[in-house]
Image (cartoon, rainbow, N blue to C red):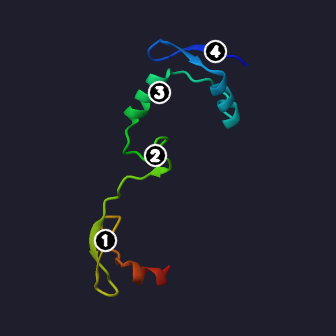
C-alpha cells in the first residue's frame, strides 16, 4: 500500500490519503476512500452542529443535548416534580418515587 492523492469533491483541492490512514480505514472496515479533504470534512462536521449529540472525537464519548423539562405535580403524593414532556390533563403524572413501583 502506498499514499494516494485524492481530489476533494467539495473544493477540488488535492489531498493525500496516507498509507497509515488507509490501514486505519481498513481496520475499521471502511470500504470507501474519503471524498473530502480534511478541511472540508472539518467544515462539514462543524456545519452539522454540536447540538445534535453524537461522538465527539476531541473530548471523547457521546454528548447529549439538554432535554427541556416541564414542572408537574405528582398525582399520588402531591410532590412537585419535573417531567421530560409537556403534561396534559388527560393522564396522571407521577414523581420518580411513585412511578418506580408502577413500572
Q: Secondary structure at mark 1?
A: strand
Residue 47: give x, y in percent of width and height.
Answer: 37, 32
Q: CA distance from mark 4 to mark 2?
A: 30 Å
Q: Disc 1 vs disc 3: which is toward the camera?
A: 3
- Mark 1 or mark 2: which comes first in sequence? 2
Residue 85, position as x, y percentages in the image: 34, 64
Q: Callout 2 environment at 10 Å: few (<14), some (14 to 19), or many (20+)?
A: few
Distance from Cα at disc 3 to Cα at disc 4: 17 Å
| Disc 1/disc 2 C-alpha distance (Å) | 30 Å
Indicate which label's residue lies in the foreground, 4 or 2: 2
Q: Secondary structure at mark 2?
A: loop
Quickly name the residue at label 4: 4
Q: Kindly report the distance in space between the C-alpha atoms of the residues bearing marks 4 and 1.
A: 55 Å
The residue beneath circle 2 is 59
Q: Position of residue 68 (x, y in %)?
A: 31, 59
Q: Which mark is residue 82?
A: 1
* Residue bearing mark 3: 41
Is 99 left, or right, of 36 in this rendering?
Answer: left
Mark 4 or mark 1: whose residue is earlier in sequence = 4
In depth, the one of 95 and 53 nearer the eye is 53
Amino acid at each position: 500500500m502506498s499514499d494516494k492523492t485524492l481530489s476533494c469533491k467539495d473544493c477540488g483541492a488535492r489531498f493525500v490519503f496516507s498509507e497509515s490512514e488507509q490501514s486505519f480505514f481498513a481496520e475499521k472496515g471502511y470500504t470507501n476512500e474519503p471524498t473530502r479533504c480534511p478541511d472540508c470534512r472539518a467544515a462539514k462536521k462543524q456545519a452539522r452542529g454540536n447540538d445534535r449529540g453524537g461522538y465527539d472525537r476531541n473530548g471523547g464519548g457521546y454528548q447529549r443535548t439538554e432535554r427541556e423539562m416541564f414542572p408537574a405535580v405528582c398525582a399520588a403524593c402531591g410532590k412537585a416534580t419535573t417531567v421530560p414532556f409537556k403534561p396534559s390533563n388527560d393522564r396522571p403524572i407521577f414523581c420518580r418515587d411513585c412511578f418506580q413501583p408502577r413500572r
